[in-house]
Amino acid sequence: MFFKDEELIFQMDIDTILQKWDHAKKQKAIYDKECDRYKDAVERYMNKKDKNDVEGDIYSVSRRSNTRQILSKADTPVEIWNRYAKRFTYMSYHLKRTR
């Protein structure tokens, strides 16, 4: 259920909304684990065949190595950190069961 109509949000009990969210998060975790198992199987297949691209009759998959550089605040002089660090602010929500 998606809440495109804001009135619908206020007609529902907040506990119902939170319960549905909790259920959706649990379902997502199950599917994430399942996706990881398939990805691991494909990775083993690619390693065995020594290939980075695999094609089936319907799907194809490719893999590539990505590199990301990071800078640790603990390893950086304060003046450098203060001058070059980028700050991002975003909302996060933490759902937990209370009883």
Image (spheres, rainbow, N blue to C red):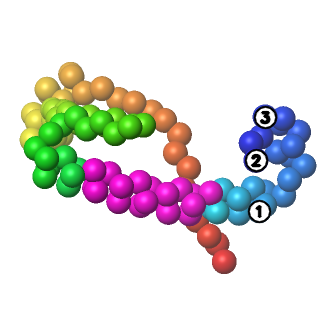
Of labels 2 and 3, the one closer to you:
2
Snapshot quadrant of residue 60: top left
State the residue position of label 1.
Answer: 15
Tell me how far mark 3 sits from mark 1, CA to CA: 19 Å
Q: Position of residue 47 (x, y in %)?
A: 14, 49
Is label 1 in a helix, a strand or a loop?
helix
The residue most toward the bottom is: 99
Q: Amino acid at mark 3?
A: Lys
Q: Amino acid at mark 1?
A: Asp
Image quadrant for the C terminus?
bottom right
Of labels 2 and 1, the one closer to you:
2
Snapshot quadrant of residue 32: bottom left
Residue at image coords 28%, 50%? 42
State the residue position of label 3.
Answer: 4
Instruction: Examine the rendered structure and indicate whether residue 76 appears above or below residue 41.
Output: above
Tell me how far mark 2 sits from mark 3, CA to CA: 9 Å
- What secondary structure do most residues of the magenta stretch adopt? helix
Residue at image coords 83%, 36%? 6
Magenta segment: does it hold 34?
yes
State the residue position of label 2.
Answer: 1
